[in-house]
Amino acid sequence: MTQVTVENVWKVYGDQTVLENINLEVEAGSFVALVGPSGCGKSTFLRMMLGDEAPSKGRILLDGVALDAEPSPDRGVVFQKYSVFPHLTALQNVMLGLEFAQSPFMGRLFGKAKKLARAESLEMLKCVGLSNAAGKYPSELSGGMQQRLAIAQALVKKPKILLLDEPFGALDPGIRAEVHEILLRLWREEGMTIFMVTHDLSEAFKLGTRVIAFDRLRTRPEEMKAYGATVTFDLDVDGKSVPPRPEMREELAAAAQ
Ligand SMILES: Nc1ncnc2c1ncn2[C@@H]1O[C@H](COP(=O)(O)OP(=O)(O)O)[C@@H](O)[C@H]1O
Ligand SMILES: [Mg+2]
């Protein structure tokens, strides 16, 4: 079933066209890896998916309904730099996600609701392998643990769509592989749809069921402002155990130049 429809979406800042004519249909449960050169509008696209920004033209539909012009619990986000609060423990950080989702004005829960939120948050910490770190502050956690905490914070709200903006770029390769496995497991278990921006093609093919590249088709200096990036490649990566075909990699590597 088509879950996300992006219809002729443009994004223009002042006199600069960043994205143009983006059209996509994404099935529920897809893992979309989004690649493209720096500055081509990948983060801008995610911000529009999040509802943080509206398209200048066109629209984005979620289950056939135009996206709210503001963030909603339907969509969770994890950025490259971990987004957890330094003055809260791991458990408090995860609970905060739930508290704001359930009590947007107060940001606090009491009594039964609070107990339930605590139990769900502890369960989520367990899922990302942080059971023993529940009482620790972010500064006491390694980079990989902080990023797992950010994932727990986003996932505890059970978003339908998870948006990841270069979430693993700052992690060491060994830790990155570990967090990949956790993310893949949660993705399968929760049946979420994921949009992940990455500059690492092997990561895109390893995790994605679909790899999409944004790029500018016109790159002469006098054209840079008037024209934005658009979808230049859109490849289904079928059979996750099968390595991507070499020609796909070459095409994408050329597109990412
Ligand atoms: N709020 C904004 N106001 C003006 N220009 C912006 C804003 N956000 C992004 N841009 C511009 O849009 C372009 C794309 O940025 P971004 O989406 O961050 O690219 P990417 O994530 O692909 O590296 C850049 O030229 C950036 O300067
Ligand atoms: Mg970016």
Image: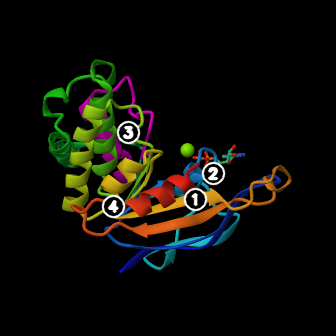
Q: How is the image coloured?
A: rainbow
Nearer the N terminus, badge 4 or badge 3?
3
Q: What span is colored magenta in the figure?
A: 78-105
Who comes first in sequence, dot 3 or dot 1?
A: 3
Q: Are marks 4 and 1 in contact (CB under 8 Å)?
A: no
Q: Are marks 1 and 2 in contact (CB under 8 Å)?
A: yes
Callout 1: SS: strand
Q: Mark 1, residues whose alpha carbon is within 10 Å: few (<14), some, or many (≥20)?
A: many
Label number found at residue 214:
1
Q: Give the CA distance from mark 4 to mark 1.
A: 19 Å
Residue type at mark 4 is Pro
The residue indicated by pointer 4 is 244
Mark 4 vs mark 3, CA separation in Å = 21 Å
Residue 87 shows up from this direction: yes
The answer to which of 99 and 164 lies nearer the viewer is 164
Give me the C-alpha separation between circle 1 and circle 2: 7 Å
Q: Is mark 2 within 8 Å of ligand 1?
A: yes
Q: Is residue 255 left or right of residue 20?
A: left
Q: Is mark 1 within 8 Å of ligand 1?
A: yes
Q: Nearer the viewer, residue 171 or 133?
A: 171
Residue lying at the far right in this picture: please name it. Answer: 222
Q: Residue at x 28, y 59 (%)?
A: 243
Q: Tell me which corner region of the image, top left, top right, bottom left or bottom right, holds residue 4.
A: bottom left
Say above or below: 192 vs 128.
below
